[in-house]
């Protein structure tokens, strides 16, 4: 047998004054019983080619279940619209038709491509959704990479300037070689949409992740979440552990989709300039206010490398970065750098 004190918020006399003793006790017990049902709820599914997970705090199991279902449904909707692999997706239709004529797309897809273009301009082309003009020639499951002649023929298609946004949510491609892939920004967008859905339902504490992209709403019931950045040199283990709340973070690494050939790692993060995998960087994690931003910037900094990439992040207010290079060295922006020992 145990006793639970009545919550302090019910203690003021104006709430209980004049109530019979038994009725006051019943009110107190009902509040305690309701609080006892509050808990963390979690669900996950394979969506957008990765593991999508949602974890939230709620007093009502049925409402928590409905909220998680809404998140997963939203993730599936975005995947159906923006997957380059599904022949019936809106993005696939754009890739098929936009070199022949302007294609009218949804406001959501138009706005996300417009936002991607802004990141391209910010990074002088280091972030470029047309990387897929060469990227589609790689098959990481089968260990296939294009040869020099194939890359040379497809490389003119990597140029974000060739994606023309017109009035009326219409988009056209200026060259027939152009192929667009939103893999560097769509999962972040999906995470942000999921968080917005949870906020609309009154949820104040949650974590939503889609592969390397996550966003934390609130904290972990009074304490920060403890988020580990994977060590790219070990299959398990963290290189850095960060206490976080109300933050988005995205990690781009060369260890998720890759194959080895003659001692060379072929991974999915390509240089828009060469059409080949970027070397010199193993992992980049970006922290910021929303996952769309952190998703795009993690790819950007990976392509730019430690010096230019971190210089870019230092110029952006409210953004921080952790980079692990191919020598295993950690690089931090000033806001995250560990204190030096005097």
Image: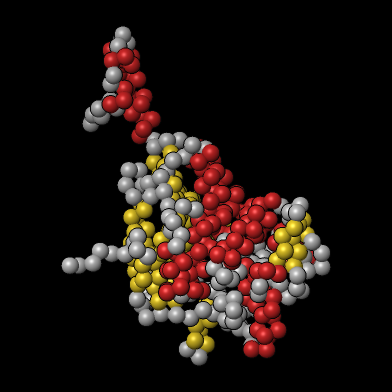
Residue 268 position within the rendered picture, expressed as x and y whole percent measured from the top left: 55, 74
In the image shown, does 26 or 86 lie closer to the viewer? Answer: 86
Residue 185 position within the rendered picture, expressed as x and y whole percent measured from the top left: 57, 61
Q: Residue furthest left?
A: 342
**Horizontally, is 179 left or right of 330 in the view?**
right
Residue 78 position within the rendered picture, expressed as x and y whole percent measured from the top left: 63, 54
Name the colouring of the figure: secondary structure
Q: Quadrant of residue 134?
A: bottom right
Q: Quadrant of residue 228?
A: bottom left
In the image shown, does 109 or 230 lie closer to the viewer? Answer: 109
- When the figure is inspected, residue 292 is found, relative to residue 17, above or below; the finding is below
Residue 44 makes an appearance in the image: no
Q: Residue furthest front?
A: 315
- When the figure is inspected, residue 106 is found, relative to residue 252, above or below; the finding is above
**Horizontally, is 208 left or right of 151 in the view?**
left
Q: Residue furthest right?
A: 100
Residue 316 position within the rendered picture, expressed as x and y whole percent measured from the top left: 46, 60
The residue located at (31%, 8%) in the rendering is: 18
**Horizontally, is 65 left or right of 130 in the view?**
left
The residue located at (36%, 26%) in the rendering is: 31
Residue 13 makes an appearance in the image: yes
In the image shown, does 34 or 165 lie closer to the viewer? Answer: 165
The residue located at (46%, 70%) in the rendering is: 309
In the image shown, does 314 or 33 lie closer to the viewer? Answer: 314
Image quarter hosting the C terminus = bottom left
């Amino acid at each position: 047998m145990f006793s639970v004190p009545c919550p302090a918020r019910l203690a003021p006399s104006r709430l209980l004054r004049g109530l019979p003793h038994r009725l006051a006790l019943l009110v107190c017990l009902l509040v305690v019983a309701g609080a006892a049902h509050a808990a963390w709820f979690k669900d996950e599914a394979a969506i957008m080619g990765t593991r999508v997970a949602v974890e939230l705090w709620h007093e009502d199991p049925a409402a928590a279940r409905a909220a998680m279902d809404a998140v997963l449904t939203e993730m599936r909707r975005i995947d159906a619209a923006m997957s380059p692999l599904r022949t019936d997706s809106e993005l696939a239709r754009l890739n098929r038709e936009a070199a022949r004529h302007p294609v009218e797309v949804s406001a959501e897809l138009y706005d996300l491509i417009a936002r991607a273009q802004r990141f391209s301009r910010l990074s002088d082309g280091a972030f470029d959704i047309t990387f897929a003009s060469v990227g589609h020639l790689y098959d990481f499951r089968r260990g296939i990479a294009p040869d020099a002649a194939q890359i040379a023929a497809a490389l003119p298609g990597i140029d974000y300037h060739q994606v023309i946004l017109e009035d009326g949510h219409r988009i056209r491609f200026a060259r027939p070689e152009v192929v667009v892939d939103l893999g560097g920004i769509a999962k972040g967008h999906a995470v942000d949409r999921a968080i917005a859905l949870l906020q609309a339902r009154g949820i104040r504490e949650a974590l939503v992740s889609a592969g390397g992209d996550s966003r934390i709403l609130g904290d972990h019931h009074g304490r920060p979440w403890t988020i580990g950045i994977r060590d790219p040199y070990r299959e398990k283990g963290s290189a850095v552990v960060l206490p976080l709340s109300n933050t988005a973070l995205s990690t781009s690494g060369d260890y998720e989709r890759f194959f080895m050939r003659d001692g060379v790692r072929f991974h999915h993060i390509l240089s828009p300039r060469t059409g080949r995998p970027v070397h010199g960087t193993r992992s980049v994690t970006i922290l910021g206010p929303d996952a769309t931003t952190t998703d795009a910037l993690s790819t950007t900094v990976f392509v730019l490398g430690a010096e230019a990439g971190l210089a870019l992040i230092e110029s952006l207010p409210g953004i921080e970065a952790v980079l692990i290079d191919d020598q295993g060295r950690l690089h931090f922006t000033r806001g995250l750098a560990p204190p030096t020992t005097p």
